[in-house]
Amino acid sequence: MEYRLNLTLSGGFFAVPYQVVDKHMALATEKQLKTLLLMLRSPEQPATAETIAAQLKITAQDALDHLGYWAEQGVLSCCAETAAAPVQNVVPAPVPAPVQSETKTVSHIVATGQRVTSNARPRLTAADINRMAQKDSNIPLLLQETQLLLGRELTPSQTNILMELYSEYNLSPQYIFTLINHCVSMGKGNMNYISSVAAGWMEKGISTAEQAEAEISRIKEARSHESQVKSILGIHDRNLTTSQKTHVARWFDEYHMSCDMIRLAFDQTVDSIGKVSFPYMDKIMLNWSQQGLSTPDDVEKANQARRSAKPSEKPSYDTDLINKRFELGNIK
């Protein structure tokens, strides 16, 4: 099916430069194009960042960034607001690429609790990013795909964070897409949070897309284990503490316990001390692991052997000793 423009529309039309359509439709953002359309609608009226910001409901800084982009491309020209207007009221020319001396060292705490030190660089303008995109075909794809994954257009500050991940952290587009998908799946599609997760992963040596996928699989498995333990213990109104999560990881990854064994350890803990205690359960399962007991049947057979053994024989695991340690405060 073909579509044609309705030339009978009331109100008339205004011109759009061929260069805008031929050169900038793929690279310019939605807000940049809207900014230009407002300018083209009233070409005889100069615009300021404040008037554009008010009409598009964006910040004046973002509007200034959009105007600067079109000025850099030669579509707009800068002019003073009045004959006596000071020079600083003129829309500034695009900032040249920053030199090394302009960087400063900053530190921040990432999600892992570790401190990451990096070089803070001056904010990239839309024109800067456009120049980078003309030299690197990955950048337009990175911008477009990220906006699709997040379901919204990136603001200039968010675009700067994305470009930092790509050009400063040297992360591949596939790595970044994997990271963003992971964060969005958790309901945290915030670029600052995404950057924090990236910093945490890099501190752990996770620098390739394959390593990122492996880390996500590990996280999903850990969460599944935690959910299973919460169900067994009847915990429905809160998340596990960091210490409790450490215990759960040990039960599955180090002791190789099944949910049936965790349930049995829970039952024995409540029978012995009348309440839930992760350290107490951990001690029971450590004893089972050391004795090679991997199923409830194994534990029952060990119990039967202990009950039938002579008093002088040592049981497979000493519940009385566990209770004594608990009472003395060695297990909480």
Image (tube, helix red, strand yellow):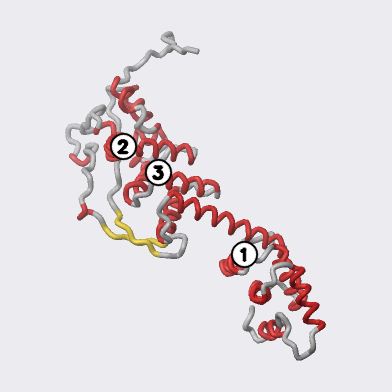
Q: Nearer the viewer, residue 280 or 128?
A: 280
Q: Earlier in the sequence, mark 1 or mark 3?
A: 3
Q: Secondary structure at mark 3?
A: helix
Judging by the rendered image, the residue that carries numbered circle 3 is 173
Q: Residue at x 32, y 60 (%)?
A: 106
Which percent across, then down, holds residue 146? 44, 40
Residue 282 coordinates in the image, percent (x, y): 64, 73
Measure how far apart labels 2 and 3 are at the Cα level.
14 Å
Left or right of 293 on screen, residue 135: left
Q: Horizontal placement of 210 versus 24: left or right?
A: right
Q: Which corner quadrant holds the C terminus? A: bottom right
Horizontal and vertical percent for residue 208? 41, 51
Give the mark, 2 or 1, whose residue is nearer the N terminus.
2
Look at mark 1 in the image and give the residue it sits on.
Answer: 252
Q: CA distance from mark 1 to mark 3?
A: 34 Å
Depicted 9 relative to depicted 207: above or below: above
Q: Is residue 241 visible?
A: no
Which residue type carries mark 2?
A: Ala
The disc, 2 or 3, on the residue closer to the chain's N-terminal end is 2
Q: Amino acid type of disc 1?
A: Phe
Instruction: Sort mark 3 into few (<14), some (14-19) or many (20+) by Cα contacts within 10 Å.
Output: some
- Residue tagged by mark 2? 133
Are discs 2 and 1 less than 8 Å apart at CB? no
Residue furthest toward the top?
A: 8
Compared with 127, 254 (above or below) is below
At x 69%, y 82%, the residue is 322
Residue 307 picture quarter: bottom right
User: SS class of the residue under badge 1?
Assistant: helix
